[in-house]
Image (cartoon, helix red, strand yellow):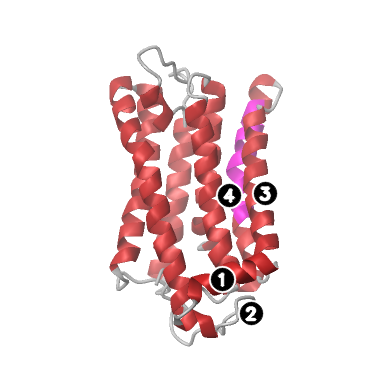
Amino acid sequence: MATLAGSALAGPDTTVEPRGDAFFARMAIVMALTVVAGFSFQLAMGRSTFASPLRVHIHAVLFMGWVAIFVLQSQFATRGPIALHRKLGWLAVGWMFAMLTAAMVVIVAMARNGTVPFFFTPQHFLIADPFTLLGFMGLTGAAVALRRDTDWHARLHVGGMAVLTGPAFGRLIPMPLLVPYAFEAAGVGSALFLVAGMVRDKRRSGAVHPAWWIGMAVLVGTLVFARVLANSPVGDAIYQAAVAGYPGADIPGLEYPAPPGTPLRTGQ
């Protein structure tokens, strides 16, 4: 994606990726299709349902809305109109914080209610999912800060979006068979987008732009640090504080829940 939220903040002299280069626009479409495919597949298989609490629907609207913003902004940045691209950028900045809030509400509720998917330990899920969001926001925030340098700006935005595709990949691969590293396995799928960007740069200019390596470092770093933290005494304390007084308090944080006898209803 050529630019996103940051372009709205840069003023009238902001430049964007050359309009003849549609790589970032195509990348945005592929990422969006991956997200749609992952969630549609689970719905078609009967493993997810629209019969979920309101908080889940709000979460879904905000995150799918971000996917739509991401695709639109990539198109506006490469094809115009740039004025609309800048205006939508203002919305995107606030939208990220709404996403973080909605996601935290759902994540904590799942841990408290004992409805974490059985291929994750509740404690790891409670910690790893927020770290994924922080990785996304960190890369996106860096893209905003470097909005005048379009080479960095574009690639950091792709990196941020790549981090968000983990749940989509997780719905396309056999997660129960990948325990105890199901979360990391989904992250490998996300990394494919970054690798695609590296290959493109290498073929085009003979060198890989450092923004791709930063995106990869953030992706891998969040996965590794979340795993280490979840298995530490600090992780124990975080989990106990989050679930105290709720059914999740009776569920061991570092044990895998028993597979359900009915189709998994994620997000509750």
Majority secondary structure of the magenta segment?
Answer: helix
Q: Circles 1 and 4: CB distance less than 8 Å?
A: no
Rendered residue at 47%/51% (across/down): 34
Q: Which residue is mark 2?
A: 255
Pointer 4 and pointer 3: residues touching (CB < 8 Å)? no
Q: Which mark is residue 239?
A: 1
Label 2 amino acid? Glu
Q: Choose mark 4 or mark 2, whichever is in front.
A: 2
Quadrant position of residue 175:
bottom right
Residue 259: percent from left, percent from top: 54, 83
Q: Amino acid at mark 4?
A: Ser
- The residue carrying pointer 4 sits among few (fewer than 14), some (14 to 19) or many (20 or more) residues within 10 Å by Cα, namely many
The mark nearer the N terminus, 3 or 2, is 3
Per the image, the residue denoted by label 3 is 221
The image quadrant where one finds the C terminus is bottom left
Q: Earlier in the sequence, mark 4 or mark 2?
A: 4
- Residue 232 falls in image quadrant: bottom right
- In terms of sequence position, does the residue under pointer 3 or pointer 1 come before the other? 3
Determine the CA span between mark 1 and mark 2: 13 Å
| Image-based side of 258 in relation to 220, left or right | left
| Mark closest to the chain's N terminus, 1 or 4 | 4
Residue 82 appears at what percent x and percent y?
33, 21
Residue 152 visible: yes
Distance (Cα) linking label 1 and label 4 = 26 Å
Disc 1 versus disc 4: nearer the observer: 1
